[in-house]
Amino acid sequence: MGDDTNAVHVEGLVKRYGDTTALAGVDLTVRPGTVLGLLGPNGAGKTTAVRILATLIQPDAGHATVGGFDVVRQAHEVRRLIGLTGQYASVDEQLTGTENLLMIGRLLGLSRRAARDRARSLLARFDLVDAAGRAAGKYSGGMRRRLDLAASLVGEPRLLYLDEPTTGLDPRSRNEVWDIVRGLVADGVTVLLTTQYLDEADQLADEIVVIDHGRVIATGTAEQLKARTGAQTVSVRPGSSDDLEKVAAEVRRVASGPVDVGGDLVVAPVAGPAALTALVRRLDDAGLVVAELSLRRPSLDEVFLSLTGGPA
Amino acid sequence: MSTMAFRNTGTLAWRTLVQIKHNPFELMDFSIQPVMFLLLFTYVFGGQLAGSPKEYLAFALPGIIVQNLLFATMNTGVGLNTDINKGVFDRLRSLPIARFSPLAGRIVADVIKQAWALLLLLAVGALLGFRIGTGPLEALGAFALLLTFAVAASWISVLVAMLVDEPDKVQIFGFVLIFPLTFASSAFVRPSTMPGWLRAFAEANPTSVLADATRGLLTGGPVAGPVIHSLIWAVALTAVFAPLSVRAFRRRV
């Protein structure tokens, strides 16, 4: 056994499929008891990374340990520690909710009775008691995802991989999944979460690793990533739309980048809070009345855009 | 095999069998279809081929059993390929279980399904007038031989399942392979009436060998030759396709 200080430790991970490089040397660390959000657009390599860490595929170079165990040489030990819920790892559609959980309990070595008890408590916890006797193929998307999560928790893993757990879910189901994840984290489960939704990473992750084209392009907390791009955004709504151009002219004097005039709103990046005071003074001096004025930090979307040069 | 591997295999075989409960179509697949074939051959073709349906039944039932058995071996591959495509395999492989238990579990379950179809065909055949003309020992021997052959032949479908991307393709492959193998054989008619080239194929065909062995064991006639010949085929199929399948399995999943 290696050191246990890091739940997951990844160094220089490379995976190629023919001419395509899915991972081009990824480093990342998930600290115990935290949620790491692996954020990136489709095809960035998120799922490939999770599949390697779940021992489903082997890397071409680099190495990864989970709980101190090597994912290639000690795959069996790694499998004892992890739970996997993903867009690909799935429940059996032709079995009922109960049967799916029973099967996994039995495979993990529980007695018939223990497996049954475990299935029952998980179904209750995930609000699936009414659907317990129905085939999983007939579940709604949200129910299915909850069953998926329940299935990955039968073995009470200390480390959970969630591969795009809310992709394709409606907002309500997404919130349910988020609540479940928060509950697990409160119980001390370490989570590696992949997502292409920035708000999901923002909501759940303690730390975010942004990857694109198989490379890590940024690491930090949501706040650090937002601060990284530096700029803040000021938006001004003139009291009268006739003043729109005049207001834009004043904003242009304090802006640190291009000014966007659209509808009845003037929006521009500014270097810092000092710009706001300056802008208020200028608007006042010019006798311009504003209906609304605000300064905000960039959204993670904007951060992502500036990091990758494309939308998530 | 370790105890864990046995247990895992048992659990996964249970899983495959319990699916039937929720998918009655699958039950139809290996119950109604063979019975339909049985009725078709007996009553539609029987009179013309052998003078009377009942007389033809005595000849054809072993052939129908063999044909059904070979078609059913494709289920193993279809099921494996479906599991891979649906992500069930990924979940199984992320668990600390014996590596080959998903494969072994499916094979065990499919042998049980084969045994069911075999009993069903014999039972319906008995209703239509088929009588086992040998003894219980020979009948048990036929059973054992057929199931052994089924496992051996299912390695082909496992290999195909590992090489194609979707379950339908396993089915199509199986149809294209098994259709000519079962009809150009002694399963339904005597090859002596076929043109020379086809007769040569039919006589070398493992389906003929297995049909002859089954016929001998169930209704009487030569037994030793066809049985040994069938076992040689079973060993050969396993020797060739099991290692290839296991290698493809390791590579794919």
Image: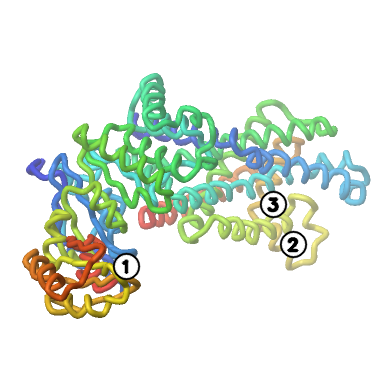
User: Residue A29 versus residue B191: which sits nearer the camera?
Assistant: A29
Residue B184 location, quadrant: bottom right
Residue A101 location, quadrant: top left
User: Residue A64 versus residue B224: which sits nearer the camera?
Assistant: A64
Q: Which residue is label 3 attached to? A: B208
Q: Numbered disc 3: what chain?
A: B
In the picture, the disc for residue B199 is 2
**x, y (%) of residue A209?**
18, 58
Q: What is the quadrant of the C terminus of chain A in the image?
A: bottom left
Helix, strand or loop at label 3? It is: helix
Determine the residue located farthest toward the top in the rendered image: A113
**x, y (%) of residue B136?**
69, 26
Q: Numbered disc 1: what chain?
A: A
Q: Numbered disc 2: what chain?
A: B
In the picture, the disc for residue A17 is 1
User: Residue B125 versus residue B175: which sits nearer the camera?
Assistant: B175
In whole angstroms, how far apart are the C-alphas of marks 2 and 1? Answer: 48 Å
Q: Is residue A214 visible?
A: no
The answer to whether residue B57 is left or right of residue B230 is right
Name the amino acid type tagged 2: Arg
Question: Are dots 3 and 2 in contact, CB under 8 Å?
Answer: no
Q: Residue at x 15, y 63 (%)?
A: A218
Helix, strand or loop at label 1? It is: strand
The count of marks equals 3
Q: Residue at x 42, y 49 (%)?
A: A169
Name the amino acid type tagged 1: Tyr
**x, y (%) of residue A174?**
37, 46
